[in-house]
Image (cartoon, coloured by chain):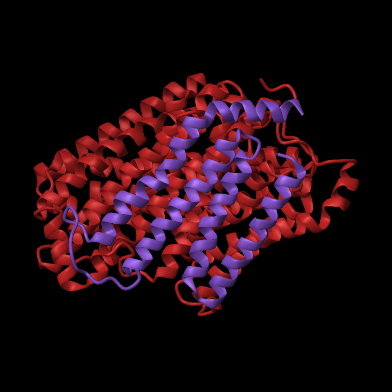
Chain colours: A purple, B red
Amino acid sequence: MSKHESDRLVVALLVLGCAAVAGMLLGSWQLVLYPSLLIIGVLLGMSVVRRRVLVATGVPVGVTALLIVLFAVLHAMGADSPSGTGAFLGWDPMTALYLFGLGPAFLLVGLLFALTDRDHAAATDEEIAR
Amino acid sequence: MTFETNFWIITVVALYLAITLGIGVWATRRTKSVADFFVAGRSLGMFVMAIAAFASVQSGFGILGGTGITFASGLAFVTGIGFAAVLGFGLAWFLVGRRLFYMGQQGEVYTVGDVVERRYNSQAVRGAMAVAMVLGVVGYLGTQVQAMGVVMGAIFGIDTTVGALIGLGILAVYAVGGGTIAAVYTDVFQGLLMIVVSVAICFYAFNVAGGVGEVTSTLRAESADLAAPFGAMPAMTIVCWVLLFAVGAAGQPQLLTKFLMIRDAKQLRWGALTAGLAYMCTMFLVVGVGLTALALSLRGEFPELSGPDQALPAFLTEYTTPVFAGLVMAAILSAIMSTGDAFVNLGAAAIVRDIPRAFGKEVRSELTWSRIAVAGLLIVSVLFSMYLDTLVALLGVFGWGTFAAAIFPAVVIGLVWRGATRQGALVSILLSILINFVLEIGARYGFTPLPEGVVNGAFALAVSIVVFVGVSLATRRSDDVAAGGEPRDVVPVSAS
């Protein structure tokens, strides 16, 4: 990872960490959740920054965007004040979204690691050579 | 329980304990060096490493406590902790899997202390990390001892202290002799047992209550919250758990040290997915039994409990066959023992290797002293759990949060960011211990400065990340000068 690339991401980590701390102190769960999801994206970005553009951008941006969209939909459906109507495969619709949407999304990171591992190896070898 | 029920449960659990003991004896014969004792001779393949990693992260708290929280509050535990920890495996593999493996190839890198000293070229950072490790390990072990006592007592109908001593005696036999090799291979057996049993009991449990739809209807009739993803917990607690257990999982030492144990880098590829899937399978048990027991309780078809943690044992004895109950009891013991054996080795490493080296000393005959340290830690954890109950409960809560806040920034971010400095690492480690202790002790005496629902460990983790990055940025130049140049690189030049 070049100094400039890593420093930019680390400054983003610093800002997002401050936002999450502020959210906890202010009692705003939204101000904790969304910076936390972005922190996950930044961390993934730090781990893949030297890889091919598709991986270096696709993995952190894709995972973060997916998590933010799913949580935003959940938020919009009223996860913090459930309506208690409807059902999906026997589950409350919001619960179904969490179990069948967010659950696999969390697991996706491990799958992406496996699919991009060859690229990761090449990037690490390049880092070693430097 | 009838005599026949008791007989079959005891038989199945006794068989489980005998197999565990057998693996331990086999592992003891294979343990001949310090490298064998601490990093399993760097011999692990993908499957063994991944299952052992999952099993050591999934503790008695996750199975017994998770089911209890689900029984008391709905799905909060699963959505906040269970799924987030799955993401944590992926993060760990992405961020440090390959880096730690390469670092392990550099020579005698066996512990988290070895990693930070090599990374920051600082004995002080190693010493601070060792203090965090010992405190966290004692807490984790103490809570595992207490959980073991409860489960063994329930199975064999004996006093909880006697039950804890029997369970720990078995753990001691294989942990003292076989070290990490014993821990890893018993973890694989225990992990596979947890996976199979968890999936089976989930479907069985929902069937008992009439299916998912019936359970949801019963919960909704009581409160819409109970059927919702966040359960009856505040949304703030759930999002704090997501941060603490997704990001913090990547900072758990029992997971990170597994990367030092694999035989080559190719073994990394499918590990994150395997470990994550395995962990998710155990959430089936928590969801199935927790929600079913709650629904049955609301219908008046479940026994009165002395506490939520009794939900799982009560369901097993009331609604399952004796053999099935025995298998699930064995799976609960697996969760407890697989975490306990990992931590006893981490604690021994901190005591025998990290603390003396932080003062520039090296222990001769590390293998022998490590075995003695393992035995000593087990004795101390029993004494603590028997006589310092409050302290154990405190350290138990303190464990995950402290590991996350102390280790994640200094080790995980430190390995991917070359600009990290020893000052940043040192301050973040010490501050994370302080924040966790002050908030956890304060909470016991009514001092709760954070808003309702905020999880102390998550707060400590967020502050620790901010402080680590901030101090590193502020001290980078002086650190470079002090170290005679850039901090040591994160990967060796000879890796291949």
Give the residue displayed 33% in from the left and 48% down from the top: B163
Q: Position of residue B346 (x, y in %)?
A: 57, 41
State the image coordinates of residue B195 (x, y, percent, origin top left).
30, 38
Q: In which quarter of the image is the N terminus of chain A?
A: top right
Quarter occupied by residue B199: top left
Relative image position of residue B486 (x, y in whole percent) = 83, 41
Relative to B433, B458 lies left or right: left
In this rendered view, identify the residue nearer to me: B152 or B339. B339
Question: Residue drawn 48% across and 66% down?
Answer: B390
Compared across the picture, whether B208 is left or right of A57 comes to left
Mark count: 0
Q: Which one is in front, B167 or A80?
A: A80
| Res. B340 image quadrant | top left
A64, above or below B105, in the image: below
**Above or below B215: residue B129:** above
Q: Residue B170 falls in which quadrant of the image?
A: top left
